[in-house]
Amino acid sequence: MLQSEQAIITCALTGAIHTPTMSPYLPITPAQLIEQGLEAVAAGAAVLHLHARDPHTGHPSASADLFAQFVPELQASGAVLNITTGGSTRMTWEERLEAALRFGPELAALPMGSMNFVFSGPDPRDRDWKYDWERDYLLEDVIFSNTFTQIERTLRVLGIEHGVRFEFECYDVGHLYTLAHFLERGLVQPPLLIQCVLGVLGGIGADPDNLHHMHAIAEKLFGDDYCMSAFAAGHHQFAFLTQSVQLGGHVRVGLEDNLYLERGRLAVSNAEQVRRAVRTLEELGRPAATPDQVRTLLKLKGAPDLNRSRP
């Protein structure tokens, strides 16, 4: 693993899994995303992982026009912006790339394989849903499609043509071998940022032994050519944050992955989770990386000129 004294804190602001009924603090509108994103950066996040939602219903959206209502303000913070290409399981590949193609960010999140991705895990209980779409959205049985063809097209269109680098989201050990395949073909270049995602039903479970195993396999496949970050969905979030730091890796927090700060208490903002992550890093002797330190470590192209973004 590429060694770094500093640890990168990524904050995933809203995602496409949790729904508005689950927490009144989940940011939905562009104004809420701006407010919570700026607070997260001020608290110590160097990278903001971005999704968009319909401001009227909270439904996940791929609209680049919606992203345009909050991306410039968040970029002005100086943070590294990481725009999803995963979107949600209901979106087509073309929809999922819409915002990243519009803005050409420094980073884009790229899932490394198709999988069962079960949403009922976050909150299967019956309740009074705020919006009609929420319950069926959580219970629907779908495949999260990330075929080799889709991955290659993303690497070529965003990576090779536009200089975007990637956060490679690996939900299972096999996804590491998929990444090694594309590295061998020359479609990605080190240093690689590998995000190990544990605890999603359909992917690898949130067991500490599993993260040790993913780390061991990544060491064999990539040597000093990668940085590892890791998180686990839900209440496992902070235990795996600690484990990732102890392995020399980096961390991700945010309301996309976990709505709580501690058992039984909702986080009132993304910044609350970032501040807790910063405290943990300090206790473990790893200061939080600045955005410019992230740019140097990952060899990012620098923030794009959004005035030149394509319509």
Image (spheres, rainbow, N blue to C red):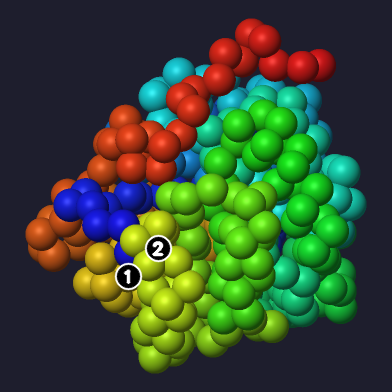
Name the quadrant of the C terminus.
top right
Mark carried by residue 244: 1
Give the x, y percent position of residue 45: 35, 43
User: Relative to 243, does residue 45 appear above or below in the rendering?
Assistant: above
Q: Is residue 76 visible?
A: yes
Q: Is residue 226 left or right of residue 249?
A: right
Three-letter amino acid code at disc 1? Answer: Ser
Mark carried by residue 228: 2
Three-letter amino acid code at disc 2? Answer: Met
> Residue 180, located in which quarter of the rendered image?
bottom right
Q: Residue furthest top?
A: 307
> Residue 128, located in which quarter of the rendered image?
bottom right
For label 1, the SS is: helix
What is the C-alpha distance between the residues marked 2 and 1?
8 Å
Question: Which label lies toward us, 2 or 1?
Answer: 2
Q: Mark 1 or mark 2, which is nearer the start of the sequence?
A: 2
Callout 1 environment at 10 Å: few (<14), some (14 to 19), or many (20+)? Answer: many
Q: Are marks 2 and 1 in contact (CB under 8 Å)?
A: yes
The answer to which of 181 and 165 lies nearer the viewer is 181
Q: How many marks?
A: 2
Give the x, y percent position of residue 162: 67, 29
Name the quadrant of the N terminus.
bottom left
Q: Is residue 224 left or right of residue 62?
A: left
Give the x, y percent position of residue 86: 71, 54
The answer to which of 245 and 15 lies nearer the viewer is 245
